[in-house]
Amino acid sequence: MLTWDLPLSEIIFDFYDKLKSGTRGYGTMNMDEPRFESADLVKLRILVGGNDADALSTICHRNVAERRGRAVLRKLQKEIPRHQFEVALQASVGGKIVARENIRALSKNVTAKCYGGDITRKRKLLEQQKEGKKRMKSIGSVEVPQKAFLAVLSTDE
């Protein structure tokens, strides 16, 4: 028999499933009347391309905010498709960024048709591509697919 104090949020966050899996269904859990204690809880906000993704925001203890934020960002990085521009995924506590991952931009070789010759033509093509991506990033938006939300909610890792 093991006895310990555990925050209710940790029990809700998949503890019961892990207990049943680890004991092959034989483990049980009893809860006593909860007592309330103050804790250093923070709101972990997830930003996709600089915009809040409210559905992915959670409240967690300050000590695990960075670890939990990085885990969410890694799952999102795998699930969100690549765009023509780089997409920044960030986890924020208050106004401070605690974790960041990037989704690389799709790249196209615009100088593939340029064989030898004047280097200024290649530079001009690369500058035009750079300006186009900059313009696209300013008006482009990133949509988070449904399967990305489901991947974040699954705690199989």
Image (cartoon, rainbow, N blue to C red):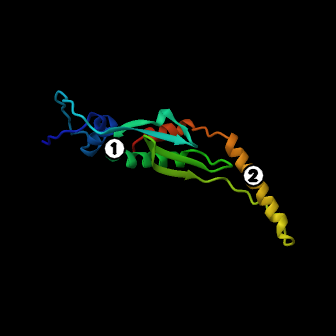
Q: Nearer the viewer, residue 20 or 30?
A: 30
Q: Residue furthest bottom?
A: 116
150 horizontally vs 114: left or right: left
- 93 vs 77, nearest the viewer: 93
Residue 26 location (% of width, % of height):
21, 39
Inspect the image, locate mark 2, and give the three-letter code of the amino acid beneath it: Glu
- Residue sticking out furthest to the left: 1
- In x, y percent, where is residue 119? 82, 69
- The numbered dot on residue 62 is 1
Q: Secondary structure at mark 2?
A: helix
Is label 2 in contact with label 1 (beta carbons under 8 Å)?
no
Residue drawn at 48 percent across, 37 percent down: 150
Question: Element under label 1?
Answer: helix
Judged left or right of residue 115, residue 40 is left
Q: Residue at x 76, y 54 (%)?
A: 129
- The residue indicated by pointer 2 is 131
User: Where residue 82 sits in the image (x, y, percent)?
Assistant: 63, 48
In this image, 55 relative to 67: left or right?
right
How dense is the environment of label 2, judged by Cα within 10 Å: few (below 14), some, or many (20 and up)?
few
Separation of disc 2 and disc 1 at Cα?
40 Å
**Counting other residues with Cα less than 10 Å from the Cα at mark 1, is it few (<14), some (14-19), or many (20 or more)?**
some
Above or below: residue 20 compared with residue 35: below
95 or 116, which is in the foreground? 95
Q: Quadrant of residue 23?
A: top left
At 77% from the left and 58% from the top, the residue drawn is 127
- Quadrant in the picture for the N terminus: top left
